[in-house]
Image (tube, rainbow, N blue to C red):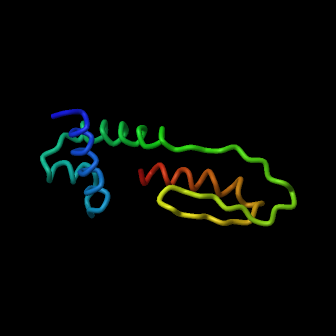
Amino acid sequence: MTSEQKSDFWQRHIDACRHSQLTQRGYCAQNNLSFSNFGYWRTRLKRKACKGSKFIPVTLSTTAMSVSVYLPGGIRLEVPAHVLPELLPAVCRLMQEQA
């Protein structure tokens, strides 16, 4: 199996596990997968996905009313400028968990 095939194989299982009602350990047991290999590939694929993300530094004026943040998947998040420093780290954490 090529490296790309392995990545695809594990990504399909990680996605299926996420959509199942099972724990990761339970999913692995039900599908005859090594739990340690599952964890290894989950981490490896998450890191690979994060390398592709790009952040552009910006400076906001104190008079800015709202800020639009464009997220992967075509999602546009528009928030009041003053809440962005608190909200953005939470959004980034959630995106990493979903990756």
Q: Nearer the viewer, residue 26 or 70?
A: 70
Q: Quadrant of the N terminus?
A: top left
Quarter of the figure with residue 45: top left
Q: Nearer the viewer, residue 4 or 27?
A: 4
The residue lying furthest to the right in this view is 63
| Residue 83 x/y as whole percent | 73, 60
* Picture residue at 30% right of the left edge, 39% below the top: 41
Residue found 72% across the figure and 61% down from its top: 67
Locate residue 65 relative to residue 41 in the image: left or right. Answer: right
Question: How many numbered marks have been drawn onto this rendered protein structure?
Answer: 0
Q: Residue at x 76, y 61 (%)?
A: 81
Identity of the residue furthest to the top in this view: 2
Q: Is residue 76 above or below residue 36?
A: below
Q: Horizontal and vertical percent for residue 72?
A: 50, 55
Residue sitting at 25 percent across and 45 percent down? 8
Name which quarter of the figure residue 71 lies in.
bottom right
Closer to the camera, 92 or 51? 51
Position in image of residue 90 (x %, y %) = 59, 54
Indicate left or right for 99 with 84 as reference. left
Q: Residue 56: horizontal and vertical position, in percent? A: 65, 44
